[in-house]
Amino acid sequence: MTKKITKEGLYIHIPFCQYICSYCSFCKVFYSKNFVLRYLKSLEIELKKYDSFSFKSIYIGGGTPTSLSLDELTNLFNMIKPYQVKDSYITIESNPDITLDKIKLLKELGVKRVSLGVQTFNQKYLKLIERESSYSKIKELIAAFNDQGINNINIDLIYGFNGQTLDELIEDLKLFASLNVQHISTYCLEVSPSSKLYNQGYEALNEDDEALFYKTIVDYLAKAGFYRYEISNFALHGYESKHNLIYWNNLEYGGVGLGASSYIDKIRYTNTKSLTKYLNNQFDDYKEIVTNDIEKFYEVMLSLRLEHGLDLKKYQNKFHEDFLIAKEDVLRPLINNNELIIEDGYLRLNKDNFFIIDFYLRKLLF
Protein backbone atom coordinates (compact mmCIF):
# COMPACT_ATOMS: atom_id res chain seq x y z
CA MET A 1 0.00 0.00 0.00
CA THR A 2 1.38 3.41 -1.02
CA LYS A 3 2.08 5.68 1.93
CA LYS A 4 -0.13 8.77 1.88
CA ILE A 5 1.25 12.31 1.81
CA THR A 6 0.18 14.29 4.86
CA LYS A 7 -1.30 17.72 4.12
CA GLU A 8 -2.41 20.33 6.62
CA GLY A 9 -6.14 20.68 6.09
CA LEU A 10 -9.25 19.63 4.21
CA TYR A 11 -12.38 21.78 3.93
CA ILE A 12 -15.73 20.09 3.18
CA HIS A 13 -18.70 22.23 2.21
CA ILE A 14 -22.23 21.09 3.06
CA PRO A 15 -24.62 23.65 1.53
CA PHE A 16 -27.88 22.50 3.10
CA CYS A 17 -29.87 24.57 5.61
CA GLN A 18 -33.24 24.12 7.31
CA TYR A 19 -33.73 27.89 6.97
CA ILE A 20 -31.88 30.65 5.11
CA CYS A 21 -30.70 33.76 7.00
CA SER A 22 -31.52 37.06 5.35
CA TYR A 23 -27.87 38.21 5.28
CA CYS A 24 -26.35 34.98 3.98
CA SER A 25 -24.34 35.05 0.77
CA PHE A 26 -22.67 31.62 1.09
CA CYS A 27 -23.34 28.64 -1.16
CA LYS A 28 -26.52 27.28 0.39
CA VAL A 29 -29.82 25.59 -0.49
CA PHE A 30 -32.80 24.43 1.52
CA TYR A 31 -32.44 20.93 2.92
CA SER A 32 -33.88 18.22 0.67
CA LYS A 33 -33.31 14.56 1.41
CA ASN A 34 -33.12 13.70 -2.27
CA PHE A 35 -30.56 16.42 -2.99
CA VAL A 36 -28.49 15.44 0.09
CA LEU A 37 -28.25 11.85 -1.11
CA ARG A 38 -27.11 12.94 -4.58
CA TYR A 39 -24.76 15.56 -3.17
CA LEU A 40 -22.99 13.10 -0.88
CA LYS A 41 -22.46 10.76 -3.84
CA SER A 42 -20.85 13.58 -5.82
CA LEU A 43 -18.82 14.59 -2.78
CA GLU A 44 -17.49 11.04 -2.49
CA ILE A 45 -16.44 11.12 -6.14
CA GLU A 46 -14.70 14.49 -5.74
CA LEU A 47 -12.87 13.31 -2.62
CA LYS A 48 -11.11 10.67 -4.73
CA LYS A 49 -8.82 13.35 -6.14
CA TYR A 50 -7.22 13.37 -2.67
CA ASP A 51 -6.75 9.60 -2.44
CA SER A 52 -2.98 10.05 -2.11
CA PHE A 53 -3.36 12.49 0.79
CA SER A 54 -4.34 12.47 4.44
CA PHE A 55 -5.13 15.61 6.43
CA LYS A 56 -4.24 16.78 9.92
CA SER A 57 -7.27 19.07 10.16
CA ILE A 58 -10.73 18.57 8.66
CA TYR A 59 -13.28 21.39 8.72
CA ILE A 60 -16.90 20.76 7.76
CA GLY A 61 -18.66 24.02 6.99
CA GLY A 62 -21.70 25.29 5.18
CA GLY A 63 -24.52 25.94 4.93
CA THR A 64 -25.42 24.00 8.02
CA PRO A 65 -23.69 20.61 8.15
CA THR A 66 -25.75 19.62 11.19
CA SER A 67 -28.95 19.97 9.13
CA LEU A 68 -28.09 16.47 7.86
CA SER A 69 -29.86 13.54 9.49
CA LEU A 70 -28.05 11.11 11.80
CA ASP A 71 -27.66 8.59 8.97
CA GLU A 72 -26.46 11.25 6.54
CA LEU A 73 -23.89 12.55 9.03
CA THR A 74 -22.67 8.99 9.64
CA ASN A 75 -22.39 8.46 5.88
CA LEU A 76 -20.43 11.69 5.48
CA PHE A 77 -17.95 10.80 8.24
CA ASN A 78 -17.47 7.29 6.85
CA MET A 79 -16.55 8.92 3.52
CA ILE A 80 -13.88 11.15 5.03
CA LYS A 81 -12.35 8.49 7.30
CA PRO A 82 -9.79 7.36 4.65
CA TYR A 83 -8.48 10.94 4.49
CA GLN A 84 -7.76 11.30 8.20
CA VAL A 85 -4.47 10.85 10.01
CA LYS A 86 -4.47 9.00 13.33
CA ASP A 87 -5.66 12.02 15.30
CA SER A 88 -7.16 14.43 12.76
CA TYR A 89 -8.64 17.55 14.34
CA ILE A 90 -12.24 17.68 13.12
CA THR A 91 -14.31 20.86 13.34
CA ILE A 92 -17.95 21.19 12.30
CA GLU A 93 -20.25 24.19 12.01
CA SER A 94 -23.65 24.03 13.67
CA ASN A 95 -26.74 26.11 14.20
CA PRO A 96 -28.46 26.43 17.60
CA ASP A 97 -31.23 24.03 16.52
CA ILE A 98 -28.93 21.01 16.78
CA THR A 99 -30.43 18.14 18.80
CA LEU A 100 -28.86 16.19 21.65
CA ASP A 101 -28.74 12.96 19.63
CA LYS A 102 -26.72 14.75 16.94
CA ILE A 103 -24.35 16.16 19.56
CA LYS A 104 -23.77 12.64 20.91
CA LEU A 105 -23.20 11.35 17.38
CA LEU A 106 -20.67 14.10 16.60
CA LYS A 107 -18.66 13.06 19.64
CA GLU A 108 -18.76 9.41 18.56
CA LEU A 109 -17.65 10.41 15.06
CA GLY A 110 -14.55 12.17 16.39
CA VAL A 111 -15.51 15.85 16.30
CA LYS A 112 -13.23 17.89 18.58
CA ARG A 113 -14.39 21.45 17.88
CA VAL A 114 -17.73 23.06 17.07
CA SER A 115 -18.36 26.48 15.55
CA LEU A 116 -21.79 27.66 16.62
CA GLY A 117 -23.69 30.35 14.73
CA VAL A 118 -25.07 32.58 17.48
CA GLN A 119 -24.70 36.00 15.76
CA THR A 120 -26.55 38.12 18.37
CA PHE A 121 -28.85 37.83 21.38
CA ASN A 122 -30.76 40.98 20.51
CA GLN A 123 -34.24 39.79 19.49
CA LYS A 124 -34.77 42.79 17.20
CA TYR A 125 -31.71 41.89 15.13
CA LEU A 126 -32.36 38.15 15.29
CA LYS A 127 -35.74 38.86 13.71
CA LEU A 128 -34.04 40.99 11.04
CA ILE A 129 -31.66 38.19 10.05
CA GLU A 130 -34.43 35.58 10.40
CA ARG A 131 -32.93 33.47 13.15
CA GLU A 132 -34.33 32.19 16.44
CA SER A 133 -32.21 31.91 19.56
CA SER A 134 -31.85 33.04 23.15
CA TYR A 135 -29.10 33.30 25.75
CA SER A 136 -30.59 30.53 27.90
CA LYS A 137 -30.88 28.18 24.91
CA ILE A 138 -27.26 28.77 23.83
CA LYS A 139 -26.00 28.34 27.37
CA GLU A 140 -27.81 24.99 27.64
CA LEU A 141 -26.49 23.93 24.25
CA ILE A 142 -22.89 24.70 25.18
CA ALA A 143 -23.36 22.72 28.40
CA ALA A 144 -24.65 19.79 26.32
CA PHE A 145 -21.55 19.86 24.10
CA ASN A 146 -19.34 19.99 27.19
CA ASP A 147 -21.22 17.09 28.80
CA GLN A 148 -20.45 14.99 25.72
CA GLY A 149 -16.77 15.90 25.88
CA ILE A 150 -16.67 18.51 23.10
CA ASN A 151 -14.91 21.28 24.97
CA ASN A 152 -13.60 23.52 22.22
CA ILE A 153 -16.38 25.82 21.06
CA ASN A 154 -16.41 28.90 18.86
CA ILE A 155 -19.37 31.24 18.66
CA ASP A 156 -19.96 33.79 15.90
CA LEU A 157 -20.87 37.40 16.64
CA ILE A 158 -22.35 39.73 14.02
CA TYR A 159 -22.33 43.48 14.60
CA GLY A 160 -22.94 46.58 12.50
CA PHE A 161 -26.72 46.45 12.13
CA ASN A 162 -28.22 49.67 10.85
CA GLY A 163 -29.28 51.68 13.89
CA GLN A 164 -27.42 49.45 16.36
CA THR A 165 -26.26 51.39 19.39
CA LEU A 166 -23.01 50.99 21.29
CA ASP A 167 -24.99 49.90 24.34
CA GLU A 168 -26.65 47.13 22.32
CA LEU A 169 -23.27 45.92 21.12
CA ILE A 170 -21.82 45.97 24.64
CA GLU A 171 -24.80 43.98 25.92
CA ASP A 172 -24.12 41.33 23.27
CA LEU A 173 -20.41 41.31 24.17
CA LYS A 174 -21.26 40.91 27.85
CA LEU A 175 -23.43 37.87 27.11
CA PHE A 176 -20.98 36.34 24.63
CA ALA A 177 -18.03 36.68 27.01
CA SER A 178 -20.00 35.13 29.89
CA LEU A 179 -20.51 31.86 28.02
CA ASN A 180 -18.23 28.86 28.51
CA VAL A 181 -16.55 29.13 25.12
CA GLN A 182 -12.93 29.31 24.03
CA HIS A 183 -13.15 31.27 20.79
CA ILE A 184 -15.24 34.13 19.37
CA SER A 185 -15.33 35.08 15.68
CA THR A 186 -16.68 38.52 14.83
CA TYR A 187 -18.14 39.75 11.56
CA CYS A 188 -19.45 43.15 10.58
CA LEU A 189 -22.76 42.70 8.77
CA GLU A 190 -22.23 42.78 5.01
CA VAL A 191 -25.16 43.31 2.71
CA SER A 192 -24.19 41.11 -0.22
CA PRO A 193 -26.01 41.39 -3.58
CA SER A 194 -26.92 37.70 -3.26
CA SER A 195 -28.67 38.18 0.10
CA LYS A 196 -32.31 38.83 0.96
CA LEU A 197 -31.35 41.98 2.91
CA TYR A 198 -29.81 43.46 -0.21
CA ASN A 199 -32.96 42.83 -2.22
CA GLN A 200 -34.92 44.59 0.51
CA GLY A 201 -32.70 47.68 0.17
CA TYR A 202 -31.12 47.29 3.62
CA GLU A 203 -28.13 49.52 4.32
CA ALA A 204 -25.38 48.49 6.73
CA LEU A 205 -23.81 50.67 9.41
CA ASN A 206 -21.72 53.67 8.33
CA GLU A 207 -17.93 53.29 8.34
CA ASP A 208 -17.23 55.61 11.31
CA ASP A 209 -19.59 53.70 13.60
CA GLU A 210 -18.21 50.42 12.28
CA ALA A 211 -14.69 51.48 13.30
CA LEU A 212 -15.90 52.47 16.78
CA PHE A 213 -17.73 49.16 17.19
CA TYR A 214 -14.66 47.20 16.11
CA LYS A 215 -12.45 48.98 18.65
CA THR A 216 -15.06 48.37 21.33
CA ILE A 217 -15.10 44.63 20.52
CA VAL A 218 -11.29 44.36 20.65
CA ASP A 219 -11.05 46.20 23.97
CA TYR A 220 -13.97 44.39 25.61
CA LEU A 221 -12.91 40.90 24.62
CA ALA A 222 -9.31 41.57 25.67
CA LYS A 223 -10.52 42.45 29.18
CA ALA A 224 -12.58 39.24 29.15
CA GLY A 225 -9.47 37.16 28.38
CA PHE A 226 -9.95 36.72 24.61
CA TYR A 227 -6.94 37.98 22.72
CA ARG A 228 -7.13 38.99 19.08
CA TYR A 229 -4.81 36.74 17.08
CA GLU A 230 -6.36 37.59 13.71
CA ILE A 231 -8.36 40.60 12.58
CA SER A 232 -11.76 39.04 13.26
CA ASN A 233 -10.88 36.19 15.62
CA PHE A 234 -10.40 36.12 19.39
CA ALA A 235 -9.37 33.18 21.54
CA LEU A 236 -8.33 32.09 24.95
CA HIS A 237 -4.63 31.22 24.75
CA GLY A 238 -4.16 27.80 23.18
CA TYR A 239 -7.57 27.78 21.50
CA GLU A 240 -6.79 29.52 18.24
CA SER A 241 -8.51 27.92 15.23
CA LYS A 242 -6.06 25.26 14.04
CA HIS A 243 -7.78 25.02 10.70
CA ASN A 244 -8.07 28.70 9.86
CA LEU A 245 -4.41 29.22 10.76
CA ILE A 246 -3.63 26.94 7.82
CA TYR A 247 -5.13 29.57 5.51
CA TRP A 248 -3.58 32.56 7.26
CA ASN A 249 -0.14 30.93 7.29
CA ASN A 250 -0.47 30.36 3.54
CA LEU A 251 -0.15 26.57 3.82
CA GLU A 252 -1.63 24.02 1.44
CA TYR A 253 -5.14 22.67 1.92
CA GLY A 254 -7.73 20.64 0.05
CA GLY A 255 -11.34 21.58 -0.51
CA VAL A 256 -14.40 19.68 -1.70
CA GLY A 257 -18.03 20.62 -2.13
CA LEU A 258 -20.05 23.42 -3.64
CA GLY A 259 -18.00 26.64 -3.94
CA ALA A 260 -15.07 25.16 -2.00
CA SER A 261 -11.49 26.34 -2.57
CA SER A 262 -8.23 24.44 -2.42
CA TYR A 263 -4.51 25.14 -2.70
CA ILE A 264 -2.41 22.16 -3.64
CA ASP A 265 0.92 21.97 -5.51
CA LYS A 266 1.02 25.66 -6.45
CA ILE A 267 -2.50 25.68 -7.90
CA ARG A 268 -5.56 27.34 -6.35
CA TYR A 269 -8.89 25.85 -7.37
CA THR A 270 -12.38 27.21 -6.81
CA ASN A 271 -15.36 24.91 -7.23
CA THR A 272 -18.58 25.67 -9.08
CA LYS A 273 -21.38 27.34 -7.12
CA SER A 274 -23.99 25.67 -9.32
CA LEU A 275 -25.67 22.77 -7.53
CA THR A 276 -26.84 21.39 -10.88
CA LYS A 277 -23.27 21.25 -12.20
CA TYR A 278 -21.96 19.80 -8.95
CA LEU A 279 -24.55 17.02 -8.92
CA ASN A 280 -23.42 16.20 -12.46
CA ASN A 281 -19.85 15.89 -11.14
CA GLN A 282 -18.67 19.09 -12.84
CA PHE A 283 -16.66 20.34 -9.88
CA ASP A 284 -14.06 22.91 -10.96
CA ASP A 285 -14.97 26.47 -11.87
CA TYR A 286 -11.69 28.39 -11.71
CA LYS A 287 -8.01 27.50 -11.57
CA GLU A 288 -5.13 29.83 -10.71
CA ILE A 289 -1.52 28.84 -11.30
CA VAL A 290 0.35 30.35 -8.35
CA THR A 291 3.50 32.01 -9.67
CA ASN A 292 6.23 33.23 -7.37
CA ASP A 293 4.82 36.77 -7.42
CA ILE A 294 1.31 35.56 -6.64
CA GLU A 295 2.69 33.45 -3.81
CA LYS A 296 4.42 36.52 -2.37
CA PHE A 297 1.15 38.42 -2.59
CA TYR A 298 -0.73 35.77 -0.60
CA GLU A 299 2.09 35.44 1.94
CA VAL A 300 2.00 39.14 2.80
CA MET A 301 -1.76 39.62 2.55
CA LEU A 302 -2.60 36.66 4.79
CA SER A 303 0.23 37.15 7.31
CA LEU A 304 -0.66 40.77 8.01
CA ARG A 305 -4.13 39.66 9.09
CA LEU A 306 -2.45 37.96 12.03
CA GLU A 307 -1.58 39.81 15.22
CA HIS A 308 2.09 38.81 14.98
CA GLY A 309 2.31 39.73 11.29
CA LEU A 310 4.74 38.65 8.57
CA ASP A 311 7.61 36.36 9.57
CA LEU A 312 10.50 38.10 7.83
CA LYS A 313 12.94 35.17 8.10
CA LYS A 314 10.35 32.74 6.74
CA TYR A 315 9.65 35.12 3.85
CA GLN A 316 13.36 35.41 3.03
CA ASN A 317 13.92 31.65 3.16
CA LYS A 318 10.86 31.01 1.02
CA PHE A 319 11.42 33.65 -1.66
CA HIS A 320 15.17 34.35 -1.39
CA GLU A 321 14.36 38.01 -0.95
CA ASP A 322 14.53 40.45 1.95
CA PHE A 323 11.06 41.98 2.17
CA LEU A 324 12.34 45.05 4.03
CA ILE A 325 14.79 45.82 1.23
CA ALA A 326 12.40 44.93 -1.61
CA LYS A 327 9.74 47.29 -0.24
CA GLU A 328 12.04 49.81 1.44
CA ASP A 329 10.61 52.92 -0.24
CA VAL A 330 7.07 52.07 0.86
CA LEU A 331 7.97 50.68 4.28
CA ARG A 332 10.29 53.40 5.54
CA PRO A 333 7.67 56.15 6.09
CA LEU A 334 5.14 53.68 7.50
CA ILE A 335 7.65 52.34 10.01
CA ASN A 336 8.86 55.84 10.90
CA ASN A 337 5.25 56.85 11.59
CA ASN A 338 4.76 53.73 13.76
CA GLU A 339 1.99 52.52 11.43
CA LEU A 340 3.95 49.33 10.80
CA ILE A 341 6.18 47.79 13.46
CA ILE A 342 9.17 45.45 13.28
CA GLU A 343 9.37 43.30 16.40
CA ASP A 344 10.96 39.90 17.16
CA GLY A 345 11.59 39.24 13.48
CA TYR A 346 8.02 40.05 12.39
CA LEU A 347 6.57 42.96 10.46
CA ARG A 348 3.11 43.75 11.76
CA LEU A 349 0.48 46.41 11.75
CA ASN A 350 0.23 48.78 14.67
CA LYS A 351 -2.63 47.28 16.67
CA ASP A 352 -4.71 50.42 16.18
CA ASN A 353 -4.54 50.03 12.39
CA PHE A 354 -6.06 46.58 11.94
CA PHE A 355 -9.42 48.04 11.01
CA ILE A 356 -7.91 49.72 7.94
CA ILE A 357 -5.69 46.81 6.86
CA ASP A 358 -6.85 47.16 3.23
CA PHE A 359 -5.24 50.62 3.10
CA TYR A 360 -1.85 49.14 4.03
CA LEU A 361 -2.18 46.11 1.79
CA ARG A 362 -2.81 48.39 -1.18
CA LYS A 363 0.38 50.30 -0.36
CA LEU A 364 2.47 47.17 0.07
CA LEU A 365 1.13 44.96 -2.68
CA PHE A 366 0.08 47.16 -5.57
Image (tube, grey):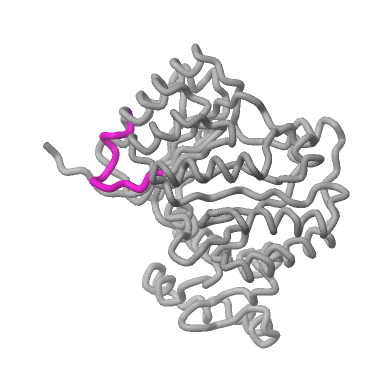
Looking at this view, is 44 or 177 the one in front?
A: 177
Task: In the rendered view, tell whether residue 282 sits above or below residue 60.
Answer: above
Which residue corresponds to the image point at 46% horizontal and 22% vertical from the top-left? 69
Q: Relative to 301, is 264 on the left or the right?
A: left
User: In x, y percent, where is residue 339?
Assistant: 68, 79
Splitting the image into 4 quarters, where does residue 186 fall? Answer: bottom right
Q: Relative to 266, is 171 on the left or the right?
A: right
Q: Which residues are magenta?
A: 79-90
Looking at this view, is 78 or 278 the one in front?
A: 78
Residue that protrudes farthest toward the top in the picture: 34
Residue 201 visible in this rendered orientation of the protein: yes
Per the image, is 81 magenta?
Answer: yes
Which residue corresponds to the image point at 46% horizontal and 27% vertical from the top-left? 283
Task: In the rendered view, tell whether residue 53 sits above or below residue 49.
Answer: below
Looking at this view, is 345 or 90 the one in front?
A: 90
Task: In the rendered view, tell whether residue 160 sits above or below residue 26.
Answer: below
User: In x, y percent, where is residue 52?
Assistant: 25, 39
Q: Relative to 83, is 131 on the left or the right?
A: right
Which residue corresponds to the image point at 50% horizontal and 31% vertical from the top-left? 65
Splitting the image into 4 quarters, where does residue 173 fall? Answer: bottom right
Residue that protrudes farthest toward the bottom in the picture: 336
Quadrant occupied by the C terminus: bottom right
User: In x, y percent, where is residue 299?
Assistant: 49, 62
Per the image, is 315 magenta?
Answer: no
User: In x, y percent, where is residue 249?
Assistant: 45, 61
Which residue corresponds to the image point at 40% horizontal and 35% vertical from the top-left? 106
